[in-house]
Every structure is written in structure tokens, then in C-alpha cells.
Image (tube, rainbow, N blue to C red):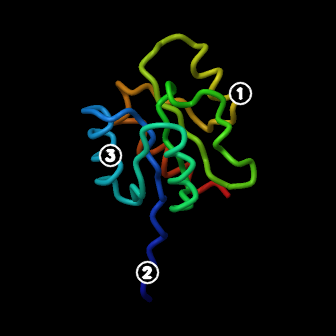
Amino acid sequence: MAMTNAPDTRVVLADYPGVGRSALAVLISETPGLALVAKASFSEEIELAMRETCPDVVVVDDRLLRDGAWMADDSGTRLVVMGVDDDPAYPARAKRIGAEAWVPKDRADTLLPAVLRRAGAVT
């Protein structure tokens, strides 16, 4: 009996350009079951990337989150927010806007792949 592979979880990464975003892009791209379909640097690019790629998950830096207005309620796209600040207000804001998870950037290598796979599997 032939095994079928589940489709990769399609991910848009929204973060400011730099070493951190590059490292996150590599982490996502090299994780089995995940496919990095676009990168964005500001809110307007996030909206465009979502329209063009129909991702399963958007990973966004909390500094780009603002009000989350670019997330369509009916899109079915999951939201994962990442940040560097330890202040509990940031994860709380992400949850209010509808994020499935808030991941500290300094733990992304251990937490993000599992969070993304789980987020992509939710229907």
C-alpha cells in the first residue's frame, strides 16, 4: 500500500528584514512538513502575500501585529505571533486579536515548528 504525504503547511513569515528573519526563514524552510511561501516586512505586504499564496499560517512579529486588521475572519488562516519582549501584555494582545500562539523568539527553534504543524492541522 502506497503512503500518501500530507500537504505541507504553507507559511507566510512577516518580520522585519535582518538576521532574525533570515534565521526564522531557514528554520521554517528546513522543517519537514512546512513550506515557506512568502516573506513580508510590513502590513501591506502581509495582505498581499496572503492574497497571493493562501497560507495556512501567518507568523508575524508582534511589532507588525498592530490591530490584526489584515487578517480576514473567514480566511481560515491561523495566526502565530512571535516577540522578544517578556511583558505579558504582548501575548495577551495577540490572543485578543485571535492568535493561536505567541512564541518567544529566543525559543523559536524548539517551539515554532511544532506550533506551526499543529496550527496547519486545525480546520
In the rendered image, which quarter contains the N terminus?
Answer: bottom left
Q: Nearer the viewer, residue 60 or 28?
A: 60
User: Please, which residue is most extreme toward the left here?
Assistant: 19
Image x and y of residue 40, in percent: 43, 44
Q: Nearer the viewer, mark 2 or mark 1?
A: 1
Work out whether mark 3 precedes mark 2 in sequence or the reverse, and give the earlier one. 2
Q: Nearer the viewer, mark 3 or mark 2?
A: 3
Crowding around mark 1 (Cα neighbors within 10 Å: few <14, some 14 to 19, many 20+) is few
> Which amino acid, by three-letter code, is at mark 2?
Met
Q: Which mark is residue 3?
A: 2
Residue at x-position 42% and y-position 58%: 37
Instruction: Reply above or below: 49 against 24.
Output: below
Image quadrant in which you'd find residue 76: bottom right
Residue at x-position 68% and y-position 55%: 75
Do the CB atoms of the residues marked 3 and 2 lie less than 8 Å apart?
no
Work out whether mark 1 precedes mark 3 in sequence or the reverse, and give the earlier one. 3
Give the labeled residue for mark 1. Answer: 96
> Which amino acid, by three-letter code, is at mark 3?
Ala
User: Please, which residue is most extreme toward the top here?
Assistant: 87
User: Please, which residue is most extreme toward the right here?
Assistant: 74
SS for dot 3: helix
Q: Measure how far apart labels 3 and 2 are at the Cα level.
A: 29 Å
Q: Is residue 16 left or right of residue 20?
A: right
Q: Measure how far apart labels 1 and 3 are at the Cα level.
A: 26 Å
Give the labeled residue for mark 3. Answer: 25
Q: Nearer the viewer, residue 78 or 4?
A: 78
Q: Which mark is residue 4?
A: none
SS for dot 2: loop
Residue at x-position 42% and y-position 20%: 84
Q: Measure how far apart labels 2 and 1 are at the Cα level.
A: 40 Å
Q: Is residue 36 left or right of residue 44?
A: left
